[in-house]
Amino acid sequence: MYRFFRPVFFMFSPETSHKLVCGLLRIVYFITPLRALVINWFSVKKSGIEREFCGLKFSNPVGLAAGFDKDANMFRALSMFGFSFIEIGTVTPKAQPGNPKPRLFRLVNDGALINRMGFNNKGIDAAVKQLKRKCPNIIIGGNIGKNTNTPNDEAPADYLECFQKLYPYVDYFTLNVSCPNIANLTELQNIGSLEVILTTVLRERDRQEKYKPVLIKVSPDISFEHLDEILEIAEKRGIDGIVAINTTVERNDLTIDRARIENIGKGGLSGKPLTQKALETVKHIRQRTNGKLQIIGVGGIMTPDDAINMLNAGATLIQIYTGFIYSGPGLVKKIIKKIQ
């Protein structure tokens, strides 16, 4: 079905298409017969594929990565497509417009996207307002970050504010310290900066009555030596898992004309070009930690086979994003059917 709609959506700019799709999905969700039809068409009830991850029980291993539902106003509609979990955000303490447009680009022949959105969102209070009406049948992750104009040495306070305000409304947290579209954000992966953020956030978790998992999202652009340092501090501090991986600033092995790539400029690359790097990173984390840190595998999952390979590499759960854009919501159903 999606193959008939995709050419229409792709006639518009990627960001305009996103708004059109979101508007359409909201309409469908709030018309009960249409919602029932979509759920019946896309959802798959299959036993034996449940997963336990950081103490949470997932009906299947397939989730939607952060970035699609930045403001937590789409997760109810997106739940129609069979995801067992949706990660909202990245959310920051204050609303911010993000980077200037255009800031999202399709590389169709490469099955990829380049984005430099820049954490555009309505702020933590707007997200909380939406999450108070949480859909009870889906797990929600909260992806949190700092505001663009917050200096890195003040970043822990931003993460703490988001963490405190979201705590009653999400099931787990992802600390986004690796997005390449916020100036100097990836420097927060440096051990000294990261340790301060972790200490701040985990101290607050200790004050809460209910334990909720905290994960770190890592960059594909750091060395495995640097990654090992992150894994060591994560285990030491009591981080529950790793989300691997974020988008990349690399532009290797693309078929698109080099002049167009240069014209597009900066931004994080996602999709098919990340498939192998994501697999290698997940395998490394699994081996390095002996399975002590659980993994959400994300990056380059464009087909059911990509999903199976990611699970076999050591991920307990997977997330899709660019594959969802190119293949449509039917990809979730196809993946679930292929999982043994």
Image: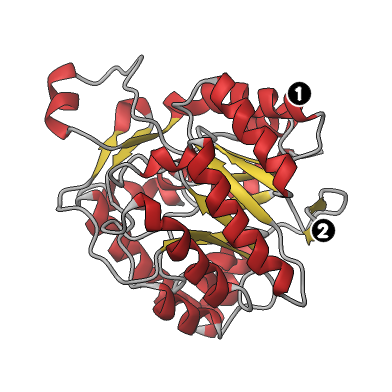
Q: Quadrant of the C terminus?
A: top right
The amino acid type found where label 1 is placed reads Gln
Residue drawn at (63%, 50%) of the image: 215
Total residue callouts: 2
Residue 134 placement (x, y as % from top left)? 59, 80
Q: Secondary structure at mark 2?
A: loop
Q: Is residue 293 above or below residue 73?
A: above
Q: Is residue 157 left or right of residue 284?
A: left
Residue 70: quarter of image:
bottom left
The amino acid type found where label 2 is placed reads Gly
Q: Which residue is mark 2?
A: 55
Q: Which residue is mark 1?
A: 287
Residue 135 placement (x, y as % from top left)? 62, 78
Q: Is residue 300 left or right of residue 92?
A: right
Looking at the image, which is closer to me, 36 or 204?
204
How far apart marks 1 and 2 lie (CA) works out to: 21 Å
Residue 99 placement (x, y as % from top left)? 20, 53
Mark 1, other Cα within 10 Å: few <14 / some 14–19 / many ≥20: few
Residue 7 placement (x, y as % from top left)? 29, 46
Looking at the image, which is closer to me, 40 or 212?
212
